[in-house]
Image: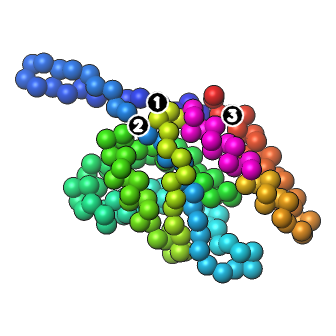
Amino acid sequence: MSPTLTTTHYYCIGHYCTMVRQKYRYFLCELCYHGNSSSGHTRDLNLAPSDLLQVIYGAVHTCYGEIGLGRVLNRIKIVYLAVMTGTALVRVPADTERSCRTALNHVTSLRGKSCSMHVVHVSGTIRSAQKILVSRNITKLHRELLSVEEQAERERLRTVLKQVLQEIEGLCF
């Protein structure tokens, strides 16, 4: 996985064209599900990045209307989504950083389940965001592994932890 760090856009006025680098910010978000279940959480294990993106677009539209949505439409990207730990890495344009962060706080549900999104960390580079993401995911999974008493659930979490560690090895730092 080698994400594109910058993109360039050409702005032309008359016969004069200039190339401008597009700057991004990376939000490390935590998905907090609300509700009662036997395990204490109601995670949606079938959540896709496109579902999360549609919810973010809806929140931007609710907060800032069609003009605000037009500023961020097709410019927000879900870089990484870890359903087991409830974390997501979202790339947003730097010029819309504040409006996107405000809109993320207005998310109230994901695919019919009561949920909120909290921005945990904001970074200017994907590399530093990935480092924070990795440390948070490993810490969360270890805590969850220690709190589980059933052997079958513990084995399932061990396999998930191994998968996360393999994903980490694939990330470029």
In which quadrant of the rendered image does the C terminus lie?
top right
Neighbours of disc 3 within 10 Å: few (<14), some (14-19), many (20+): few
**Towards the viewer: 128 or 41:** 128
Neighbours of disc 1 within 10 Å: few (<14), some (14-19), many (20+): few
Marks 3 and 2, Cα distance to the nearest angstrom?
22 Å
Looking at the image, residue 13 lies above or below residue 144:
above
Q: Amino acid at mark 2?
A: Tyr
Q: Nearer the viewer, mark 3 or mark 2?
A: 2
Q: Residue at x 13, y 18 (%)?
A: 16
Q: On the image, numbered disc 2 is attached to which residue? A: 24
Report x, y in % for residue 102.
38, 58
Considering every residue shown, the one lying at the far top of the view is 16
Q: Nearer the viewer, mark 1 or mark 3?
A: 1
The total of numbered circles placed on residues is 3
Q: Amino acid at mark 3?
A: Gly
Neighbours of disc 2 within 10 Å: few (<14), some (14-19), many (20+): many
Q: Is residue 74 visible?
A: no
Element on which disc 2 rests: strand
Considering every residue shown, the one lying at the far right of the view is 151
Q: On the image, numbered disc 3 is attached to which residue? A: 170
Marks 1 and 2, Cα distance to the nearest angstrom?
8 Å
Q: On the image, numbered disc 1 is attached to which residue? A: 5
Q: Which residues are magenta?
A: 127-139
Marks 1 and 3, Cα distance to the nearest angstrom?
17 Å
Report x, y in % for residue 80.
57, 46
Q: Amino acid at mark 1?
A: Leu
Q: Nearer the viewer, mark 1 or mark 2?
A: 2
- Which quadrant of the structure image shows residue 59? bottom left
Element on which disc 3 rests: helix
Q: Is residue 10 visible?
A: yes
